[in-house]
Image (cartoon, rainbow, N blue to C red):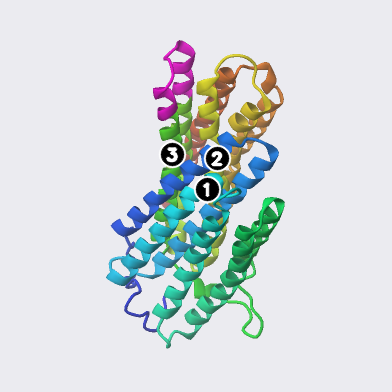
Amino acid sequence: MTWDIERGPLFRPIVPHQHSRVTYAELLFDLVFVFAVTQVSHTLLSHFTPLGAVQTTLLLLSVWWVWVYTSWITNWLNPELTPVRILLFLLMLGGLVLSTSIPLAFDSRGLWFAIAYAAMQVGRTIFWLVSTPPARTAARMNAVRILVWLSISAVFWIAGGLAQGQARLLLWALALGIEYVSPAVRFWIPKYGASKVADWYVEGGHLAERYAGFIIIALGESIVVTGATLADLKWTSEVIAAFLSAFVAALAMWWLYFHKGAEAGSELISNSREPGRLARLAYTYLHLPIVAGIILSAVADDVVLQHPAGHSDVRTIVCAVGGPMLFLVGTILFKHAIRGWLQLSHGVGIVALGVLGWFGTELSPLMLSIATTLLMVIVAVWESLSLRSGAARVKAQSEATSA
């Protein structure tokens, strides 16, 4: 599917059967979110209470959503052009304000967080609308629909920034709910109705690469947290073992996502007749638990490194087991969206992690970390072997049919 009308001077050129590369300006923008992800994990670590977990989850959802919208916009607009680069630079500035406000977002910097978030969401959409040629009526109406939804949510973001305590949490939750529901209802607004999936044309290979880059950001953040914590500790045998367990777990997560899943997703969305629909489900929504799992695992690594001995408390179990479990839930759903079937290895791994969490209090934080890492490695090896044997069977059947 391609657009049969002029895209506009600021849009990426469409080259059939050619992958649009991720530009250096996009990579520079993404680096801001290394800081944002670090801030989210540190905030959870310092506010690990039920209320703190809810607040941190809301902050993570916000960081993810503002990055998602930017990745879609830069899939359409061309960051090699100066006006689009300036847009990205301004969004970087907003992202830095957003990130630095995260630790005190529910305290003294709530209004700063809200203003930065609303300005990024609304301002970027206005730029997109203005950049869309009048001849592209459907695309312009799509931009108008999105702008309406984001403008409504912005009211609640600012109102929440001005409010205090539970009122802020409720107003921000409402604002975020508006934004997360809007793609699912295709940005329906009165009189103009909902947008069509055809209006969401994306260059699949480029978008898949952007999301893979965010997974790298999250994994890199977990390694940074682990390294920074290790540097400040006395290097005992238990600390070294905890460090190795965290490192191997990060490698296992990388393997589970990048060995086959990322490549398969990129190929499928690149050849899909409805790349917008697949991008909305497999990438916009289903990548969120993957990122959340990596961040929660990073918090677990920090906790285990500092207190490897003794019995595991609730916080340690929730992080050490919940992180890998969220990651596997996200990856099994993502791979189901691109393959059409559930990966048995991932399902078994999720169940095994649940059983391990049930008996987690009987284990030390170090042993719990090693056990979860071992399960992740087993799942990664199992999937690799099953896909290899499946490919071999398909090849053998193909050769037999040819003969």
Instruction: Tell me which amino acid carries mark 3.
Output: Glu
Relative to 248, is 388 above or below? below
Who's the residue at 57% across and 35% down the image? 46
Q: Which residues are magenta?
A: 227-245
Instruction: Tell me which amino acid carries mark 1.
Output: Ile
Relative to 315, is 391 above or below? below
Relative to 245, is 25 above or below? below
Decide which of 190, 335 is in the foreground and name it.
Answer: 190
Instruction: Tell me which amino acid carries mark 2.
Output: Thr
Q: CA distance from mark 1 to mark 3?
A: 16 Å
User: Nearer the N terminus, badge 1 or badge 2?
Assistant: 2
Main SS of the magenta segment? helix
Q: Position of residue 82 (x, y in %)?
A: 28, 69
Residue 194: quarter of image? bottom right
Circle 1 sits on which residue?
Answer: 102
Which disc, if any, is residue 221?
Answer: 3
Q: Given contact means CB atoms under 8 Å apart, are the residues at marks 1 and 2 in contact?
A: yes
Circle 2 sits on which residue?
Answer: 43
